[in-house]
Image (cartoon, rainbow, N blue to C red):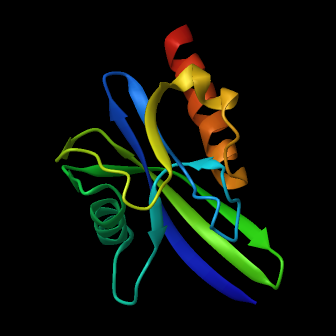
Amino acid sequence: MSMLVVAAGMIFSGGKVLICRRPLSKKLEAGKWEFPGGKREDGESLPETLARELREELDIEIDSARLVDARVKSYEGDVQVLIAFFRVDGFRGALKAKEHSEIKFVNISELTDYELAEADRRAALALIKNREETDAE
């Protein structure tokens, strides 16, 4: 069984979070929405992976990132993916959808209105729950 390690960014701006739509040409979860990111390369830390992937996918530089969640997803063919989700509260550059068919900022409460990739959906539900708990305090 092989293990891939992925870093994904929950990019916040103006109280909303960025989601990106996977192109229909992708093998896995084509057309579904996700938090942007990608696979770790040899020798990279997860924050380095996140910064590189966001530069490649969205043409932005991030100011900081904080680990908020991690999930393991199993796929057919004995492949497991560890996805580490980071909260990103600042970035520089104009967002460009270089690898996604569409990108948009949405309210956290609206995340469940989109067909999210499975691991991203579970992370989004945790984000919504955490926000509800924080708002209730």
Number of numbered discs = 0
Q: Point out residue 13 in the picture as x, y percentages from the top left corner.
A: 31, 30
Which quadrant does the N terminus fall into?
Answer: bottom right
The reply to whether residue 137 is visible in this rendering is: no
Residue at the image point whose x is 63% and y is 68% from the top: 26
Is 115 situated left or right of 87 in this image?
Answer: right
Q: Point out residue 114 in the picture as x, y percentages from the top left corner.
A: 66, 34
Residue at the image point whose x is 63% and y is 67% from the top: 25
* Front residue of 8 and 64: 8
Residue reaching furthest right?
A: 76
Residue 53 vertical position relative to residue 69 in the rendered view, above or below: below
* Front residue of 102 and 29: 102
The reply to whether residue 105 is visible in this rendering is: yes
> What is the quadrant of residue 125 in the picture?
top right
> What is the quadrant of residue 46 in the picture?
bottom left
Is 33 situated left or right of 99 in this image?
Answer: right
Is 132 situated left or right of 98 in this image?
Answer: right
Is 93 situated left or right of 32 in this image?
Answer: left
Residue 81 vertical position relative to residue 35 in the rendered view, above or below: below
Q: Point out residue 31 in the picture as x, y percentages from the top left corner.
A: 66, 52
* Front residue of 114 and 80: 114
Residue at the image point whose x is 27% and y is 62% from the top: 55
Residue at the image point whose x is 56% and y is 9% from the top: 136
Q: Point out residue 14 in the picture as x, y percentages from the top left corner.
A: 31, 22
Residue 66 vertical position relative to residue 73 in the rendered view, above or below: above
> What is the quadrant of residue 40 in the picture?
bottom left
